[in-house]
Amino acid sequence: MIAATVLAAGDSARMGSPKALLDFQGATFLERILSKLREVPVDITYVTVGRDRHKILKGNKLDASSVIENKELNAGPIGSIRSVLRVIPEEVEALLIWPVDMPHVQTETARLVVGAKSNRPIVVPVWRGSRGHPIWLKREVFGEILQLSEGDTMRSVVRRDANRVHRIEVDDSAVIETI
């Protein structure tokens, strides 16, 4: 089983409203990503939310059971990831992580990341030498993420050992561009 999560718990202080609700090509950022995930071979999709939970739920068509509240808001995105890891079923073998401020990543890029034939536990898309998102994690790194110290990030997990990272070259500059 493969799960995916859209990280939408940030405060979006500079934007004035949650990024999940911003418009991208006629749909909210969140709706755009969720529609792309329906075309990617994932079995379960979660959305992590924070202080703007009610606005996000009101502004998007979401299955309430797929919404997970990040209780570690001060931890940043890693808090959202840990919130998902604490509730996903034991059968989930891997998790695709897609930040909400990247609605322009191509569906094909996400398919390539999820479909990577690799024994390595971390898969990242790469555009012109730069690593990006969405990233894919196998269950073998879930415990490590749950045990991270304060101040650690996913970047520290990915950079801990280059030999466990499978890099996929993609023709999609959006993997390194947040909106």
Image (tube, helix red, strand yellow):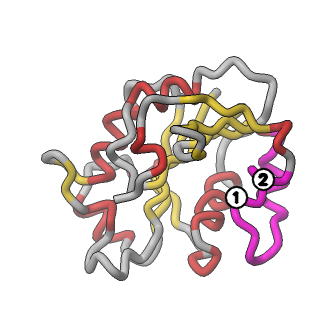
Residue 10: percent from left, percent from top: 46, 71
Residue drawn 57% across and 38% down?
126
Residue drawn 78% across and 35% down?
121
Secondary structure state at the residue bearing disc 2: helix
Disc 1 target residue: 155
Q: Can you see residue 92?
A: no
Q: Amino acid at mark 2?
A: Arg
Q: Is label 1 in contact with label 2 (beta carbons under 8 Å)?
A: yes
Q: CA distance from mark 1 to mark 2?
A: 6 Å
Residue drawn 74% across and 22% down?
118
Residue 6: percent from left, percent from top: 47, 50
Q: Residues within 10 Å of mark 1 (few under 14, many from 20)?
A: few
Q: Is residue 161 found left or right of 48 in the rendered image?
A: right
Q: Nearer the viewer, residue 116 or 53?
A: 116
Residue 171: percent from left, percent from top: 44, 29
Tag shown at residue 55: none
Q: Is residue 170 found left or right of 146 in the rendered image?
A: left
Q: Amino acid at mark 1?
A: Arg
Compared with residue 76, is residue 30 higher up or lower down, i.e. above or below? above
- Quadrant location, the N terminus: top right
Residue drawn 59% across and 72% down?
76
Q: What residue range appears in magenta?
A: 140-160
Tag shown at residue 159: 2
Q: Is residue 148 found left or right of 77 in the rendered image?
A: right
Q: Nearer the viewer, residue 170 or 135?
A: 170
Quarter residue 21 falls in: bottom left
Q: Is residue 146 magenta?
A: yes
Q: Can you see residue 52?
A: yes
